[in-house]
Image: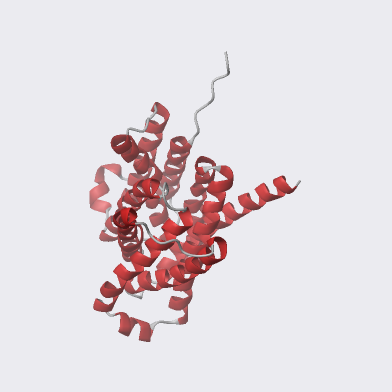
Amino acid sequence: MQTEQGKALIYLKLVATMTLWGGTFIAGRLLADMGATSGALLRFVAATAFLLAVTLRKEGRLAPLPRSQWGKVTFLAFTGVFLYNICFLYGLQTVPAGRASLIIASIPAIIAVASALLFKERLTALKVLGVALSIIGAMTVISRGDLLMVFDHASLGDLFILGCVGSWAAYSLMGKQVMGELSPLAAVTWSCILGTIMLLPVALGTGLAGELAQATPVDWLSCVYLGVCGTGLGFTWYYQGIQRLGAARAGVFINLVPVNAVTMGCLLLGEPVGLSLLAGAALIITGVYLVNKPPRLRPAA
């Protein structure tokens, strides 16, 4: 009974995590009046403080970073914290939350292709189909249904969101190697610390002081939500799901993120939901499912 209750709690946490991650697109849109670098810095100040507290509670201390891992974790900080979040917040200044979430939802397909090219991971016919569907779905969203004119319809904001796809794919691929020597919590915490340090001089140089003086309560709440809920709490619960259920089964829940973001964007921000958005969503979610679908076990002879 205790085991079943524990598993149910993990499922509940994973669903809650995907809801929190869907909400990050709404919070990012609400930060549109604040500079992207300032918003990113404040997000990771909050995230770092939260993750340090969680690490101290769970592991007793933040383990020192081995010399051999400095370069790799610095790469994680640059791609997953610095570059991703600048692209994320710049993109959300002009791109609707639901649309942005669907473009970013193609990340697992891109990771599958890169893993096959770089690490010689097997890419089955089903995964190839999933990758193709995800890419076509993202193009459908970007082009608003007119695939032949995809580049004419793409905006600068769309390009920033595509930058999120590339930077997070790079972060994930490097993360596979780093997790072999560091706990997931330590790796995320260290990457947040180093990423925050990277963001600080850029934010100072782009008007941090003035933007802090003019920040509204909505700006502060959005930053706290992005840092504590979207990053700290979301990553903590997600890694608990990976530890209990495995990466493949926990990863399937990520399909809920764009669904939540589109729904919240419509309900909270009044964003329109057109046929091209729905069609793109169906293609992307189907593609991501096929990429993550575990292989069918053959019966023993």
- Tell me where residue 146 sits by quadrant: top left
Q: Which residue is drawn at the image coordinates 39% and 73% (left, top)? A: 42
Residue occupying image coordinates x 42% and y 46%: 180
Q: Is residue 215 above or below residue 161?
A: below
Residue 7 percent across, percent down from the top left? 66, 47
By what rule are the colours in the image chosen?
A: secondary structure
Q: Position of residue 179 (x, y in %)?
A: 42, 49
> Viewer-proximal residue, 72 or 224?
72
In the displayed orientation, state which residue is furthest to the top: 301
Count of residue discs: 0
Front-lying residue, 157 or 250: 250
Outermost right residue = 1
Picture residue at 33% right of the left edge, 35% below the top: 116
Answer left or right for 47 relative to 195. Answer: right
> Who's the residue at 50% across and 33% down the image?
294
Looking at the picture, tell me which residue is in the foreground, 68 or 52.
68
9 vs 258, left or right, is: right
Q: On the picture, is 86 further left or further right than 283?
A: left
Q: State whether residue 106 appears in this view.
A: no
In x, y percent, where is residue 209?
A: 31, 84
Q: Residue furthest bottom?
A: 213
Can you give x and y, in whole percent of width and height, for residue 109 in the image? Answer: 38, 41
Query: Of residues 189 and 90, which is closer to you in this image?
Result: 189
Which image quarter holds the C terminus? top right
**Is residue 65 something one can see in this rendering?**
yes
